[in-house]
Image: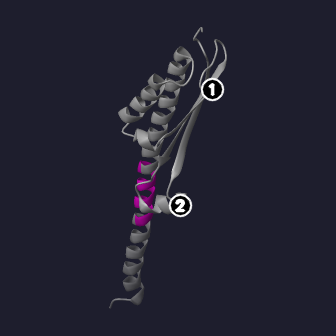
Protein backbone atom coordinates (compact mmCIF):
# COMPACT_ATOMS: atom_id res chain seq x y z
CA UNK A 1 0.00 0.00 0.00
CA UNK A 2 1.44 3.41 -1.04
CA UNK A 3 0.97 6.21 1.42
CA UNK A 4 0.12 9.74 0.47
CA UNK A 5 3.26 10.95 2.19
CA UNK A 6 5.47 9.16 -0.38
CA UNK A 7 3.54 10.63 -3.30
CA UNK A 8 3.73 14.19 -2.06
CA UNK A 9 7.49 13.91 -1.42
CA UNK A 10 8.10 13.27 -5.13
CA UNK A 11 6.36 16.51 -6.05
CA UNK A 12 8.21 18.38 -3.33
CA UNK A 13 11.61 17.22 -4.51
CA UNK A 14 10.78 18.26 -8.08
CA UNK A 15 9.68 21.72 -6.92
CA UNK A 16 12.83 22.08 -4.80
CA UNK A 17 14.99 21.05 -7.76
CA UNK A 18 13.36 23.68 -10.00
CA UNK A 19 13.89 26.42 -7.39
CA UNK A 20 17.53 25.47 -6.80
CA UNK A 21 18.20 25.18 -10.54
CA UNK A 22 16.70 28.64 -11.13
CA UNK A 23 18.88 30.14 -8.40
CA UNK A 24 22.03 28.44 -9.69
CA UNK A 25 21.43 29.59 -13.28
CA UNK A 26 20.73 33.14 -12.04
CA UNK A 27 23.97 33.17 -10.04
CA UNK A 28 25.94 31.73 -12.98
CA UNK A 29 24.71 34.36 -15.43
CA UNK A 30 25.25 37.11 -12.86
CA UNK A 31 28.88 36.03 -12.49
CA UNK A 32 29.33 36.01 -16.28
CA UNK A 33 27.77 39.47 -16.60
CA UNK A 34 29.88 40.88 -13.79
CA UNK A 35 33.06 39.47 -15.38
CA UNK A 36 32.19 40.97 -18.75
CA UNK A 37 31.43 44.34 -17.15
CA UNK A 38 34.70 44.32 -15.20
CA UNK A 39 36.60 43.56 -18.40
CA UNK A 40 34.94 46.56 -20.08
CA UNK A 41 35.83 48.74 -17.06
CA UNK A 42 39.47 47.67 -17.29
CA UNK A 43 39.50 48.62 -20.98
CA UNK A 44 37.99 52.05 -20.16
CA UNK A 45 40.50 52.69 -17.37
CA UNK A 46 43.39 51.59 -19.61
CA UNK A 47 42.18 53.95 -22.33
CA UNK A 48 42.03 56.82 -19.83
CA UNK A 49 45.52 56.00 -18.54
CA UNK A 50 46.98 55.81 -22.05
CA UNK A 51 45.22 59.06 -22.97
CA UNK A 52 46.64 60.81 -19.91
CA UNK A 53 50.15 59.58 -20.69
CA UNK A 54 49.83 60.82 -24.26
CA UNK A 55 48.27 64.14 -23.14
CA UNK A 56 51.20 64.72 -20.78
CA UNK A 57 53.62 64.31 -23.67
CA UNK A 58 51.55 66.36 -26.13
CA UNK A 59 50.66 69.08 -23.61
CA UNK A 60 46.88 68.77 -23.74
CA UNK A 61 44.07 67.72 -26.03
CA UNK A 62 45.34 66.83 -29.51
CA UNK A 63 44.21 64.54 -32.29
CA UNK A 64 46.93 62.06 -31.29
CA UNK A 65 45.58 61.87 -27.73
CA UNK A 66 42.04 61.19 -28.94
CA UNK A 67 43.29 58.63 -31.44
CA UNK A 68 45.24 56.86 -28.69
CA UNK A 69 42.16 56.63 -26.45
CA UNK A 70 39.95 55.43 -29.29
CA UNK A 71 42.56 52.85 -30.30
CA UNK A 72 42.65 51.41 -26.76
CA UNK A 73 38.85 51.19 -26.68
CA UNK A 74 38.78 49.45 -30.05
CA UNK A 75 41.43 46.96 -28.88
CA UNK A 76 39.09 46.02 -26.03
CA UNK A 77 36.14 45.51 -28.41
CA UNK A 78 34.36 48.63 -27.21
CA UNK A 79 32.87 51.13 -29.64
CA UNK A 80 34.93 54.35 -29.49
CA UNK A 81 32.01 56.37 -30.90
CA UNK A 82 29.93 55.62 -27.78
CA UNK A 83 32.56 56.83 -25.32
CA UNK A 84 32.50 60.31 -23.83
CA UNK A 85 36.05 61.65 -23.69
CA UNK A 86 36.84 64.77 -21.68
CA UNK A 87 40.35 66.25 -21.58
CA UNK A 88 40.98 69.42 -19.65
CA UNK A 89 42.61 71.81 -20.12
CA UNK A 90 42.99 71.80 -23.87
CA UNK A 91 46.53 73.16 -23.54
CA UNK A 92 48.68 72.90 -20.44
CA UNK A 93 52.05 74.46 -19.71
CA UNK A 94 54.87 72.39 -18.26
CA UNK A 95 54.01 71.00 -14.81
CA UNK A 96 50.31 71.89 -14.98
CA UNK A 97 47.75 69.14 -14.29
CA UNK A 98 45.86 67.48 -17.12
CA UNK A 99 42.71 65.45 -16.49
CA UNK A 100 41.51 62.73 -18.87
CA UNK A 101 38.05 61.24 -18.28
CA UNK A 102 36.55 58.39 -20.29
CA UNK A 103 32.92 57.37 -19.71
CA UNK A 104 31.38 54.41 -21.53
CA UNK A 105 27.75 53.22 -21.51
CA UNK A 106 27.79 49.47 -20.79
CA UNK A 107 24.64 47.61 -21.78
CA UNK A 108 24.10 44.34 -19.88
CA UNK A 109 23.46 41.26 -22.01
CA UNK A 110 21.09 39.36 -19.73
CA UNK A 111 17.51 40.46 -19.13
CA UNK A 112 17.40 40.29 -15.35
CA UNK A 113 20.61 42.33 -15.02
CA UNK A 114 19.16 44.89 -17.41
CA UNK A 115 16.03 45.07 -15.26
CA UNK A 116 18.07 45.56 -12.08
CA UNK A 117 20.42 48.18 -13.57
CA UNK A 118 17.88 50.19 -15.54
CA UNK A 119 19.39 49.36 -18.93
CA UNK A 120 22.75 51.15 -18.93
CA UNK A 121 25.66 51.10 -16.51
CA UNK A 122 28.13 53.95 -16.97
CA UNK A 123 31.75 52.87 -16.65
CA UNK A 124 33.80 55.92 -15.77
CA UNK A 125 37.56 56.36 -15.35
CA UNK A 126 39.50 59.56 -14.73
CA UNK A 127 43.28 59.96 -14.66
CA UNK A 128 45.22 63.09 -13.76
CA UNK A 129 48.81 63.74 -14.78
CA UNK A 130 51.18 66.67 -15.22
CA UNK A 131 52.11 68.14 -18.53
CA UNK A 132 55.63 67.38 -19.71
CA UNK A 133 55.49 69.58 -22.79
CA UNK A 134 57.81 72.56 -22.65
CA UNK A 135 56.43 75.44 -24.69
Pick the front one: 120 or 68: 68
Pick the front one: 103 or 33: 103
Determine crowd level at label 2: few under 14, some 14-19, many 20+ residues with C-alpha closer than 10 A. Answer: few
In this picture the colour scheme is one colour
Provide residue 69's location: percent of width, then percent of height.
45, 29
Taking the image as shown, residue 90 lies to the left or right of residue 44, namely right
Residue furthest to the top in view is 134
Provide residue 73's location: percent of width, then percent of height.
42, 34
The mark nearer the N terminus, 2 or 1, is 1
Residue furthest to the right in view is 96
Tag on residue 25? Answer: none
Tag on residue 116? Answer: 2
Taking the image as shown, residue 32 lies to the left or right of residue 133, namely left
Mark 2 or 1, closer to the camera:
1
Q: Which residues are magenta?
A: 22-32
Question: Is 44 situated above or below 116?
Answer: above
- Residue at the (45%, 34%) spot, across then down: 43
Residue furthest to the bottom in view is 1
Residue located beneath label 1 in the image: 89
- Residue at the (67%, 17%) spot, across then down: 96
The main secondary structure of the magenta stretch is helix
Amino acid sequence: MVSRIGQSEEGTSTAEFVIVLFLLVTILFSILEFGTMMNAYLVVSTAAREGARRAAIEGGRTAEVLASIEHQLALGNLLPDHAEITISPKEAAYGRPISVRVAYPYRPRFGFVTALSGGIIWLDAEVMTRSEKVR
